Amino acid sequence: MFGIFFILAAHEHYSIDVFIAFYITSRMFLYYHSLANNRALQQRDSFRTKIWFPMFSYFEAHIDGIVPNEYSNPLAAGKLIKLAKSLFVFVRFISDKCLEIL
């Protein structure tokens, strides 16, 4: 909802197309996640699911059950240190190549 305000405040879109896009996007999100979390609708022979969401069968083909709500911190300390080291090596490599050219 916060993004909708800024799109409308920037005067780049008409109000109606922003609201229609929000409605369609929110319904698709709700329908897809309802299907993904409902075991009865995940059956492979569900004709109704294949008609309304043909890509659902493809995206959820190798999932054996409901995906658990487990989260991890993408910015863990070990990963940040490794990223900083590789970035430092890269910058040093680029600066050495630039000095060779000069």
Image: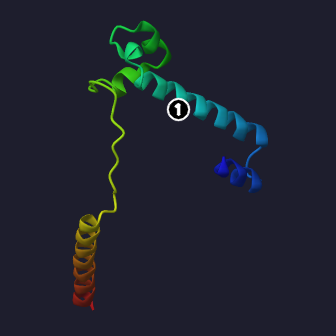
Q: Residue at x 50, y 16 (%)?
A: 52
Percent from the top left, x then y, of residue 79? 26, 64
Give the residue number, with chain letter if any, for mark 1: 29
Res. 20 image quadrant: top right
The amino acid on which the numbered mark 1 sits, given as a three-letter code, is: Phe
Is the residue 9 above or below the residue 56 in the image?
below
Percent from the top left, x then y, of residue 81? 25, 72
Q: Quadrant of the C terminus?
A: bottom left
Colouring mode (rainbow / by chain / secondary structure / one colour) = rainbow
In depth, the one of 39 and 87 nearer the eye is 39
**On the picture, is 46 further left or further right than 52?**
left
Structural crowding at the residue carrying mark 1, measured as other residues with C-alpha within 10 Å and reported as few (<14), some (14–19) or many (≥20): few
In depth, the one of 40 and 44 nearer the eye is 40
Res. 58 image quadrant: top left
What kind of element bears circle 1? Answer: helix
Q: Residue at x 41, y 25 (%)?
A: 36
The mark tally for this picture is 1
